[in-house]
Image (spheres, rainbow, N blue to C red):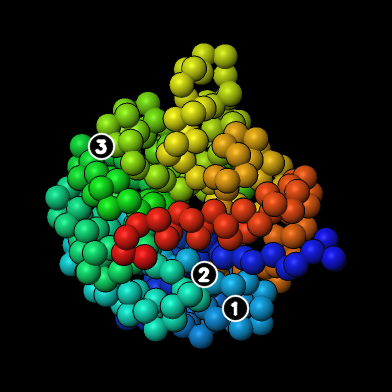
Amino acid sequence: MSDAAPLSIIDFHCHHIPARWPPTTLRDAAPDQRARWEHINRLMADEAALFTDIDSGDIDARVINTSTALVGDEDGNVPADIFEPVNDALANLVHRHPGRLYGLASVDAFAGETAAREATRAIRDLGLHGLFLESARGDRLLDAPEARPTLAAAAALGVPVFVHPVYPRDLTRQLAPYGRLGTLYARGTINAMSLIALLEGGIFDELPNLHVVVTTLAIGAVLLGGGLTGAKLRSDTPEKLRRHVYIDTMGFDPALIRASVDLLGADHVLAGSDWPIVNDKPIRERVERAFAAAGLNRQEQQLVASGNTRRLLERHAGA
């Protein structure tokens, strides 16, 4: 490792929320977590904080999103008119720092044609690089008819869709007594459910050019349930997953990175930290240790560290 050139790292999973939209994360925070979330909220609103790791040489770039669920009510609902100004602000920030920041446009996937129009505007007019969608809204997953126009727009535009975990209200409350592990499992479960819905709901069949990114939380939940490895797996499922699905390394768990690579290949895994919600320093040290522990060779490490992200984000004509 010491004789090889340093890894080029792009952190795919980063959140930024301008101060004009205060997060509501403190509403349900446990007393022992309030100080942590106050610190996270400050970092999410701080533009300068986005560049600390870049300026130090720890990473090369960030892919940023504005998770509107973090400013919504307990069901993730936000005002319908928030998405255009959010994407305008994100595009302005990204365009001021080309090559250092990439941006994913936020849209309400369950808003039908309205969401699809905003997705198209954000990519074609604002020059953002992909879409950021919440995994679910209430009882609806991404195979809901209301979500089809946005997914079709992403496929037509050739941009990736980051399917982000949310807090499923009932399951989160049920698992809350088990602390952060329970919360993470609830989020991983809903992320996995949306992946299963896309796969089993026929969305990938209808939209052959659709590419989605899920987190290792989803893969962990699915693998624990045997959903992608069971004996009843359809023969076309592994190849269908490879055509459509990428996994980010949220958490940098070597076992899940290994499982993700074994499932989809090293060319379908993306380095992502969930910054600043996860803000362990330094990122480079975490990446290199996790990749080595996962048994990735140097070529695989470079693909996961940045090569796959560059290819995925720069594939569309507007990049």
Query: Where in the figure is residue 180, as x and y percent of width and height?
Result: 60, 53
Residue drawn 31% across and 64% down?
318
Q: CA distance from mark 2 to mark 3?
A: 31 Å
Q: Quadrant of residue 25?
A: bottom left
| Tag 1 and tag 3, C-beta contact below 8 Å | no
Helix, strand or loop under label 3: loop
Q: Earlier along the polypeptide chain: callout 2 or callout 1?
A: 1
Point out the frontmost of discs 1 and 3.
Answer: 1
Total numbered labels placed on residues in the image: 3
Q: Which residue is mark 3?
A: 144
Q: Is residue 54 visible?
A: yes
Query: Where in the figure is residue 244, as x and y percent of width and height?
Result: 43, 39
> Residue type at mark 2?
Arg
Q: Which residue is mark 1?
A: 54
Q: CA distance from mark 2 to mark 1?
A: 8 Å
Give the class, few, some or many, for how many residues have Cα within 10 Å of label 2's Cα (few <14, many ≥20): many
Helix, strand or loop under label 1: helix
Query: Where in the figure is residue 138, as x and y percent of width and height?
Result: 30, 43
Q: CA distance from mark 1 to mark 3?
A: 39 Å
Tell me the quadrant of the picture where the C terminus can be found: bottom left
Q: Quadrant of residue 5?
A: bottom right
98 with respect to 271 (left or right): left
Q: Which residue is mark 2?
A: 62
Does residue 24 sit above or below 193 in this rendering? below
Residue drawn 69% across and 41% down?
258
Give the class, few, some or many, for how many residues have Cα within 10 Å of label 3's Cα (few <14, many ≥20): some
Please tell me which residue lies in front, 52 or 17.
52
Please tell me which residue lies in front, 125 or 91.
125
Residue drawn 54% across and 33% down?
222
